């Protein structure tokens, strides 16, 4: 039984490139749709471990969740910075 030592031929990618001059079409962004009422979306921020600890301790000292503290700050900001 003889085995073949033939390697597959390399593809010539230059010949495979499309010569079409059409402009590419792009689909509109799908990330602007409104989230259904009652659903929650994440808001992610980066903070140093010390800032995170301080924020968490501040919220805990006031018997608040970090979520509630953030949105209390957001409401205060919007009221005072129209």
Image (tube, rainbow, N blue to C red):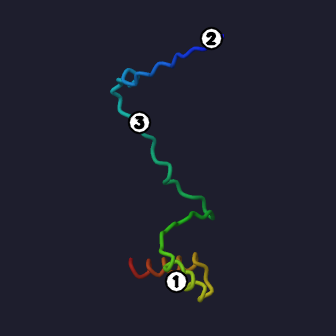
Q: Residue 5 in the image: x percent, y percent?
A: 54, 16
Mark 2 sits on what residue?
A: 2
Instruction: Please name the residue shown 52% across and 16% down the image.
Output: 6
The residue positioned farthest toward the top in the image shown: 1
Q: How far apart are the two marked residues, 1 and 2, measured between alpha carbons?
A: 74 Å
Q: Is residue 53 left or right of residue 77?
A: right
Quadrant where the N terminus lies? top right
Q: Residue 56 in the image: x percent, y percent?
A: 57, 81
Q: Nearer the viewer, residue 35 or 55?
A: 55
Per the rendering, the mark at residue 25 is: 3
SS under mark 2: loop
Please name which of the two marks, 3 or 1, marks the residue nearer to the observer: 1
Q: Residue 66 in the image: x percent, y percent?
A: 57, 78
Mark 1 sits on what residue?
A: 54
Quadrant where the C terminus lies? bottom left
Evaluate if marks 2 and 3 touch, with contact meaning CB atoms under 8 Å apart.
Answer: no
Instruction: Please name the residue shown 52% across and 83% down the image.
Output: 54
The residue positioned farthest toward the bottom in the image shown: 61
Q: How far apart are the two marked residues, 2 and 3, measured between alpha carbons?
A: 52 Å
Earlier in the chain: of badge 2 and badge 3, it is 2
Q: Residues within 10 Å of mark 3 (few under 14, many from 20)?
A: few
Q: Is residue 23 left or right of residue 3?
A: left
Q: Nearer the viewer, residue 41 or 49?
A: 49
Location of residue 27 (image quadrant): top left
Earlier in the chain: of badge 3 and badge 1, it is 3
Q: How far apart are the two marked residues, 3 and 1, measured between alpha carbons?
A: 49 Å
SS under mark 3: loop
Q: Residue 78 in the image: x percent, y percent?
A: 44, 77
Q: Nearer the viewer, residue 46 or 65?
A: 46
Instruction: Please name the residue shown 35% across and 32% down the image.
Output: 23
């Amino acid at each position: 039984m003889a085995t073949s030592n033939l390697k597959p031929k390399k593809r010539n990618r230059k010949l495979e490139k499309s010569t079409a001059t059409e402009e590419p079409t792009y689909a509109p962004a799908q990330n602007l749709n409104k989230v259904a009422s009652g659903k929650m979306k994440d808001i992610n921020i980066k903070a140093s471990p010390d800032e995170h600890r301080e924020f968490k301790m501040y919220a805990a000292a006031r018997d608040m969740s970090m979520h509630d503290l953030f949105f209390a700050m957001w409401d205060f900001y919007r009221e005072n910075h129209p």
